[in-house]
Amino acid sequence: MQSGMTIGRLAKLAGLNVETIRYYQRRGLLEEPRKPLGGHRRYPHGAVRQLAFIRRAQQLGFSLEEVKTLLKLGGGAHARETRELAEKKLAVLDTRLEQLERMRLELRKLIAASRKARPGHDPIVDALFATDEPE
């Protein structure tokens, strides 16, 4: 009896598409099992856990390269390195949140101006055409 599971079964258990798993393999995030003669590759049950790790890390904003690094660092021996990577990611997210908040405020102002604009005048389009350069 063969142990492990096919890529189709793995995909189903992980809630992913087979092509996503193959993509992760090409990127070096998941090892591709050896294919036996006349048989199908069999994935260990731990692959489901590894795919869940990849998915969760992506949900936290880590790129696939960063996920690969986290997988290599895995375990408590490299807690400082993983924490530093997470701190860098948090700083990037904080910066992005600040940018998004500025964008949100600007859009609110433009929408308010648009509601008060005279007919035939579009403050939103005017603002998008505006340049920061002096004329």
Image (cartoon, rainbow, N blue to C red):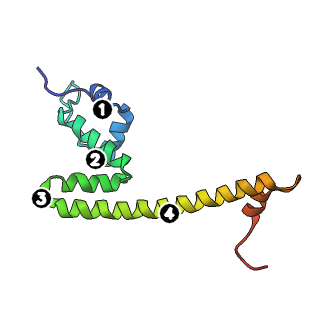
**Residue mark closest to the camera, 1 vs 4:** 4
Judging by the rendered image, the residue that carries numbered circle 2 is 29
Which residue is identified by label 1?
14
Q: Say above or below: 6 vs 125.
A: above
* N-term-proximal mark, 2 vs 3: 2
Closer to the chain start, of discs 1 and 4, is 1
Crowding near the residue tagged with mark 2, few <14, some 14–19, many ≥20 C-alpha atoms within 10 Å: many
Instruction: Answer with the quarter of the image where residue 51 lies.
Output: top left
Judged from the image, the secondary structure of the residue bearing numbered disc 3 is helix
**Which residue is tagged 4?**
98
Q: Nearer the viewer, residue 104 or 67?
A: 104
Q: Nearer the viewer, residue 22 or 91?
A: 91
Q: Is residue 119 above or below residue 130?
A: above
Residue underneath mark 3: 77
29 with respect to 112 (left or right) = left
Residue 79's x, y, as percent?
Answer: 17, 59
Mark 2 or mark 1: whose residue is earlier in sequence: 1
Q: CA distance from mark 1 to mark 4?
A: 34 Å
